Image: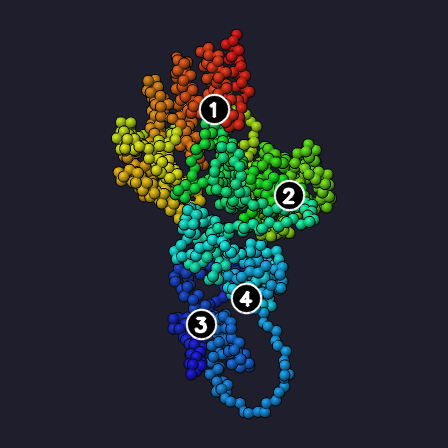
Amino acid sequence: MPNLRRSLGSVGALAAFAIGVPACNVVTGGTPDQLVPRTVPDLSVPGALHRVGEDLRWAYLDGTLIPWLAHTVVWCGWAIGIILILLDVVRLLRVGGIVAARHLAGRSPHSWITGLVASALLMFSASNAAATPAGTTIVATADHQPEPKAPRPDPYHVPDELRPDCPRHQVVLGDTYWSLAEHHLGDGRRYPEIDALNHDRIPNPHHLLPGMVVLLAPDATNLPQPIPGGAPQVVVEAGETASSIALREYGDPNAWHRLWDLNRNRPQPDGRAWRTPDLLLPGWRLQTAEPPPAPPPPAVPPPPQPVAPPSTPTTAVTPPPTTTAAPSTAAVAGPTPGTAVSLPTDAFVSIGLAALVTAAVFSLRLRHRRHRPTTAGSHDPTLAPVVRALRVEYDRATLPRADDGGLDYTDNTAVPYEVAGREHAVHVAEGLLPAGKIALGAREGQLAALDLAAAGGLGLNGPGATAAARALLVTLHAQQQAQIVIPAADVPLLFDTADLRDTPAVQIASDAPAALDMAAEFASTDRPVVLVMAAPEGRAQLQLEKVIGDHPHTIVAILLGPWPAGVTLTVAADGAARGAQWSGTRLFHLPATDAADLLTLFRHVHSTEQPDVDKPELAAVSESAWPPTAGDEIDRARPLHLQVLGRLHLRWTGAANQDLIEALAPRQREILTYLALHPAGCRREGLTAALWPDAPLDRPHNAFHATLSQLRGALRKTTAGAISEITVNTDGHYGLNPALISVDLWQLQDALRNVRVALTPDDLLAGLERVLDLYTGRLADGFAAGWIEPYREAIHRDALGAISQLISHVGQRDPAQAVLLLERARDLDPYNEAIYRDLMRLHARLGHRDAIRRTLVLLTTALAEIDARPAGGTIQLAQALAAQRGA
């Protein structure tokens, strides 16, 4: 009975399709005579195509085009269906409906039609199929022990002895041979290799089901691994995201990328894989950290005959450094840095390079503190996107975490934070970048390095070769370990339009032969040389091999293309390397724009240009866009006073002038400082971009709102409920409430504005003295976040410009008072050499010969803190002024 009902249903479905579809089409106005055009346009007539287009356009406008297309598509589909039904009827009548039904396993639309036809035919053949055949004499025609059939290959299991050199991949939902070849073999066009390896077990490559095991080519990379035994893991609950899990596990929602790096493309219990950071499903298992190290094996006695080590190892995998001795008290205690980092600019570099970039930024800041231009100057290389991104990643990898999970930028060292930061960054870089080898990439969380000299050079091939070569060159240049020589023809290939002519440690040769001669010349002075050029061929290759052979320890080569005399790696676009001993390694790589920006940064750092300190470098007062605020008599009526000039303080006048700043977490102090810099308020988007540059794009403001809520709670708890809300919000425009809080920076800007608009000498003098009283130190002194530096420099420049104007105003009539003002300026800017020179001149004018020598000693001591010495002109000035007095 069930078979009969199924057969009747199939007959009804076929009849409905064969008769009902054309009937509905005709009823709705889709008769064939109305659909077929009555005339065919003559395309040979000029303008015929234009007229056809105009006809179609008018048909669309008057509403007849869409119904015509719909009816035409229905008639075509009906005709195709009828043809398929007739073909299946003929075929099934030949082989029989029962046989066809047994072999019906497809899922295509044609297979569905075949199923309906087969079910209908079974109704007519059911009686014959169910009849009992006539009895016959049973005759044994087979052997008593027939040979067993060979087992059918299992698509869900591959024996270990079958192609042990081929990696195994468990199919997840969405996998195709093309996607597997593209991701693991570097090129989707290699999918026939996967089909050839698996055709006996999976004959239909379009029929991949989750759980099937696929053999991949031996050079496959980026293979997902199961969660290691003993590794901590979590089970995703409904509603959880990568950010929420990162907040729970690491204390920072922005650390979701750690989960992504550990679990990307890993198969999950439901047959899927994590391939989109924003998509997590309940029940998935995510690894949260590396498994704990296995206990060391018990000591065993050494063998009687030790084995000699290999002659020249070419590769090494260097683990990240553990705890090492700090270089000085300036080093900051923090977490152990990792190995590599991916940037929003599509770069993938080592944390060691990020440390060198950080050291370069601090070096430039120290130089600016010694020599301060009168204007903002040219483009600041420290503000390039890749530089700022590397600074953020370095801070994330090395700075300790505050109680709220954010980075703690507080600087408590006795020396300037630039000095402390530079020493720590250099120390981190020395620990991460191996000496005598070049860091190529990362493999399984460890650094992969190569001894170029022992390997005979490195050839890079494939779509990611130039980006990998850029990363190697920039790292070598940052380390200042070798002279880099590049033929002029190869510079555009690596750096596009970047100008490398004034880049230290980089020499541009006119052509390849000139590059070989230049490299040999540098090698004759025992200076290491790195040749970077396109892989030569024929005679040029022999010449390069000869040059390297003549200087095996001083000349190494990085070549774009295969290099038979050394190591050749094929690099995919994402940096995945293919080559002997390099499976699973991802090479560092840099886009051309990022490489040019980093070279510009290092060019400024290593420039030997000395500033001209003959003229005072105190800046003039610049125009200010700060709005006026109320005076001191109103400020005293406000319960809170925020001091951001010098060390941060938040005074509460309601409790014996209590300082509340210690009750606030570092991130909360950052928000207060940022809002103090914008007295008229700021957009939430700008604040979030400055303080949380790597916030998730789908939830960019979550961390800001959470921190603001914690700030309210901290104030409410500390003031026993007297104060909680000190910010105002108008449609996403946030600012400090001027009715509750006064800010010393706002008062300084008022004083600078009064200086600009002063009409009398007395008003000018009063305004300048007010600036001197208010500017007690650099903005948020001891706070080392990168976003604050442009504000800090601008305010410092304006304040010192006003103080310089005050010194000029007073010095004409009272040199002794001018000396006191210059000493105050020296305390505010202790590395500005021009201030010491002006002090020497005033001491000479007053006849204070010993004070000239003391001033030079003070300058020498101050500059020693930043690893600098007084300029020769300053020393000559001191000697000349002392000699004039002696004469």
Residue 829, x across and y down, in percent: 44, 25
Kindly identify the amino acid type of the residue bearing the numbered disc 1. Answer: Asn
Please tell me how crowded label 3 is: few (under 14), some (14-19), or many (20+) other residues with Cα within 10 Å: few
For label 1, the crowd category at 10 Å Cα-Cα, with few meaning under 14, some 14 to 19 and many 20 or more, is many
Determine contact: label 3, label 1, CB under 8 Å: no
Q: Residue at x 55, y 39 (%)?
A: 431
Mark closer to the chain start, 1 or 2:
2
Indicate which disc, 3 or 2, sits on the residue closer to the N terminus.
3
CA–CA distance in space, label 3 to label 2 = 77 Å
The answer to the question of whether label 2 and label 4 lie on touching residues, with beta carbons closer than 8 A, is no
Name the image colouring: rainbow
**Number of residues whose C-alpha sits closer than 10 Å to that of mark 2, classed few (under 14), some (14–19) or many (20 or more):** many
Q: CA distance from mark 2 to mark 4?
A: 43 Å
Q: Nearer the viewer, mark 3 or mark 1?
A: 1
Q: Which mark is residue 156?
A: 4
Residue 373: image location, x then y, percent: 47, 26
Identify the mark nearer the N-term, 2 or 4: 4
**Residue at image x 41%, y 66%?**
67
Q: Amino acid at mark 4?
A: Tyr
Circles 1 and 2 in contact, beta carbons < 8 Å: no
Q: CA distance from mark 1 to mark 2?
A: 44 Å
Instruction: Indicate which disc, 3 or 4, sits on the residue closer to the N terminus.
Output: 3
Q: Marks 3/1: CA distance?
A: 92 Å
Question: Looking at the image, is 718 positioned above or below residue 696?
Answer: above
In the rendered image, which residue does mark 2 sit on? Answer: 451
Q: Secondary structure at mark 1?
A: loop
Earlier residue among tags 3 and 1: 3
Q: Which residue position is annotated with label 1?
A: 832
Residue identifier under label 3: 32
